[in-house]
Amino acid sequence: MNCTLCPRNCNVNRSTQNGVCKTNNVVLSRVAPHMWEEPCVSGTKGSGTVFFAGCNLQCRFCQNHEISVVPKGVEVTTRQLADVFLRLQDMGVANVNLVTPTHFSNKIASALQLVKHQLSIPVVYNTGSYEKVEALKQLHGLVDVYLPDLKFASPTVSKQLANCPNYFQVATKAIEEMRRQQPNDIFNAEGYITNGLIIRHLVLPGFVEDSKLVLDWIAQFGKQTIVSLMSQYFPARTDELLPQLNRKLFRHEYNSIVDYFSNVGLQNGFLQDLQSATQDYLPNFDKDLVLQLLATLPNN
């Protein structure tokens, strides 16, 4: 069947060729505890991240481009993916964190249906938000915490940076569906989020005005919404067309968005130190590490 899973509607047969996301079958690039998510997601236990190769957005500034733009990793079956979720739980992590899952959401849903009843930790859906509402509905009851990006507001900016001028229209409807599924933000006694929604926004150099538009929408969506306002951008590769992407964020740029966050009445969120803008925080996408973990699964 030709793929129309995401809003790209590239309509290719992903059993024989790659879509816009650069992938066909599920490919894992990393499976490991990760300490650098928001405090209520990683805490001291770490978040059990499952990094999927490929991406339907293909943002030109992507800091994980080595797995999203040029996918690499290990192909897995639905059963193996389900067993990966259980293995992460055995490691004592705070949650199972599905990173860049959009283009595999149907297969992720199938894997979760196999083992959701065995998971005593939350499932986190960590997405760029270029999602179809009908695809998200297939995850209802399977995902406990939604961790969506709201990357851009302006059609011009989203066209420039991800070749999807309708990003804002699509992403905001997707986030509304996520909130419908998880209407309340719930934390356990240890401070970890167990249910709910956290909207992430990465402030980009030279695009401060677009960030303000993003915050305007979130404030209208709900002033109690938890927002993660990120400053971690660094140039992962040289961009010849948009030179502002070849530098880190200026402190005054980030501070102006922090001030704007308060000015529009938003009340809950996480800020980031500008020192986080370094490749030192990037995960190690070593295929051999994934293979080693897969070799320990019960059905291998």
Image (cartoon, rainbow, N blue to C red):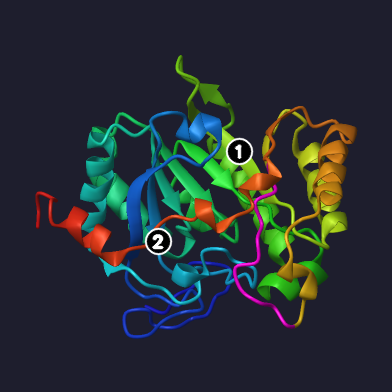
Residue 185 numbered tag: none
Q: Are marks 2 and 1 in contact (CB under 8 Å)?
A: no
Residue visible at 50% across and 20% down?
A: 191
Q: Position of residue 136 (x, y in %)?
A: 50, 52
Vertical order, 186 against 124 (above or below): above
Q: Residues within 10 Å of mark 2 (few under 14, many from 20)?
A: many
Helix, strand or loop for disc 1: strand
Indicate the quadrant containing the C terminus: top left, top right, bottom left or bottom right.
Answer: bottom left
Q: Position of residue 149 (x, y in %)?
A: 63, 51
Magenta span has 35?
A: no
Helix, strand or loop for disc 2: strand
Residue 189 vs residue 79, the one in the foreground? 189
Would you say residue 165 is visible in this rendering?
Answer: no
Please, what is the dominant secondary structure of the magenta stretch?
loop
Residue 242 vs residue 20, the one in the foreground? 242
Residue that badge 2 annotates: 52
Q: Which residues are magenta?
A: 229-240
Residue visible at 26% across and 59% down?
A: 290
In the image: residue 47, left or right of residue 277: left
Residue visible at 57% across and 55% down?
A: 133
Vertical order, 114 against 271 (above or below): below
Magenta span has 236?
A: yes
**Amino acid at the residue labelled 1:** Ile
Q: Quadrant of residue 247?
A: bottom right
